[in-house]
């Protein structure tokens, strides 16, 4: 007899993710394995597997399950890949990536969210994820290059620092466009050249920071993750992605 969350999760994968065209078995399995309800507040647990984003505090959201899947499917992480995520939020997308890649670095600008992500990631045994507090629009040059880079927040332009940290053969996915609406863009570095493809309309919270938007206005800021005032930022997770934001605008 499976618990109800497992049943909800299986249904989520079948009706929201597979039904919309994600077919990579490794990706589907990762979504079946990771208990999404552990990445949301207690009061939202019943809604954790619903077809929409949910609030995680501080004006931020955990993305709609399909949006997380579409983004990950576009970059196809492989076993040996090193991944950089910008915008850890709840830690859920990092937990999925952790099942698919060798190592995941995820940067979050809001310390309280980073702390929550660390706890949730620990609770699911994601030992290969490192959560770092800072402005991820600079990337993390110290661990570059990355086989995969994911921006979990919207940008007007992909910051040059992130493109520079993409490995040969690497894939970068980012919501690119205005503050309210974006298109999921996929960049590939092949033989030194960057190729760009536009995939699907989407709506993400803005990337706030030097290479992103200004926090309180609709202007773009000027353009290395910086430590917060509280000291070492790198929190290595020890063993064991309307006001509906972060969703695709599929019909
Ligand atoms: N991937 C997350 C998850 O699975 O829950 C969802 C991320 S949420 C849509 C976007 C996150 O990006 C927010 O937590 C926000 O604080 C963060 N963010 C915005 N600007 C950032 C920046 N410059 N550096 C790092 N994180 C940033």
Image (spheres, rainbow, N blue to C red):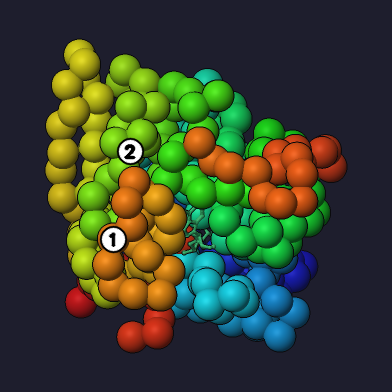
**Rendered image quadrant of residue 41:** bottom right
Residue bearing mark 1: 220
The N terminus, quarter of image: bottom right
Q: Secondary structure at mark 2?
A: strand
Residue displayed at 77% across by 51% down = 230
Seen in the picture, residue 134 relative to 232 is either above or below; the reply is: below
Residue displayed at 22% across by 67% down = 178
Q: Is residue 186 visible?
A: yes
Q: Secondary structure at mark 1?
A: loop
Q: Disc 2 beta carbon < 8 A from ligand 1?
A: no
In the image, farthest residue toward the top: 191
**Residue situated in front as seen by the camera: 250 or 174:** 174
Q: Is residue 120 visible?
A: no
Residue displayed at 44% across by 39% down = 138
User: What is the x, y in percent for residue 141?
Assistant: 49, 27
Residue bearing mark 2: 172
Seen in the picture, residue 172 relative to 113 is either above or below; the reply is: above
C-alpha gap between disc 1 and disc 2: 21 Å
User: What is the x, y in percent for residue 114?
Assistant: 67, 56
**Residue situated in front as seen by the camera: 229 or 87:** 229
**Rendered image quadrant of residue 208:** bottom left
**Rendered image quadrant of residue 165:** top left
Residue displayed at 47% across by 66% down = 63
CB-based contact (under 8 Å), mark 1 and mark 2: no
Mark in front: 1 vs 2:
1
Side of 151 relative to 102 (left or right) = left
User: What is the x, y in percent for residue 144?
Assistant: 48, 23
The C terminus, quarter of image: bottom left
Q: How dense is the environment of label 2, judged by Cα within 10 Å: few (below 14), some, or many (20 and up)? A: many
Q: Disc 1 beta carbon < 8 A from ligand 1?
A: no
User: What is the x, y in percent for residue 212?
Assistant: 35, 55
């Amino acid at each position: 007899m499976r618990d109800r969350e497992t049943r909800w999760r299986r249904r989520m994968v079948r009706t929201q993710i597979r039904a919309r065209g994600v077919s990579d078995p490794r990706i589907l399995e990762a979504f079946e394995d990771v208990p999404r309800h552990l990445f949301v507040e207690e009061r939202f647990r019943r809604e954790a597997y619903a077809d929409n984003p949910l609030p995680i505090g501080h004006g931020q959201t955990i993305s709609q399950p399909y949006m997380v899947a579409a983004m990950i499917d576009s970059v196809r992480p492989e076993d040996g890949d090193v991944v950089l995520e910008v915008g850890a939020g709840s830690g859920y997308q990092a937990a999925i990536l952790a099942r698919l890649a060798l190592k995941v670095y995820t940067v979050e600008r809001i310390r309280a969210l980073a702390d929550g992500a660390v706890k949730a990631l620990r609770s699911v045994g994601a030992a290969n994820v490192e959560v770092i507090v800072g402005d991820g629009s600079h990337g993390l040059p110290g661990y570059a290059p990355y086989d995969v880079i994911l921006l979990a927040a919207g940008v007007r332009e992909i910051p040059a620092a992130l493109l520079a940290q993409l490995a040969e053969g690497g894939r970068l996915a980012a919501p690119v466009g205005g503050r309210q609406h974006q298109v999921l863009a996929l960049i590939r570095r092949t033989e030194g050249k960057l190729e760009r493809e536009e995939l699907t309309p989407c709506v993400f919270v803005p990337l706030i920071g030097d290479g992103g938007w200004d926090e309180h206005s609709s202007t773009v800021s000027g353009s290395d993750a910086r430590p917060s005032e509280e000291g070492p930022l790198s929190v290595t997770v020890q063993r064991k992605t309307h006001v509906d934001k972060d969703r695709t605008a599929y019909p």
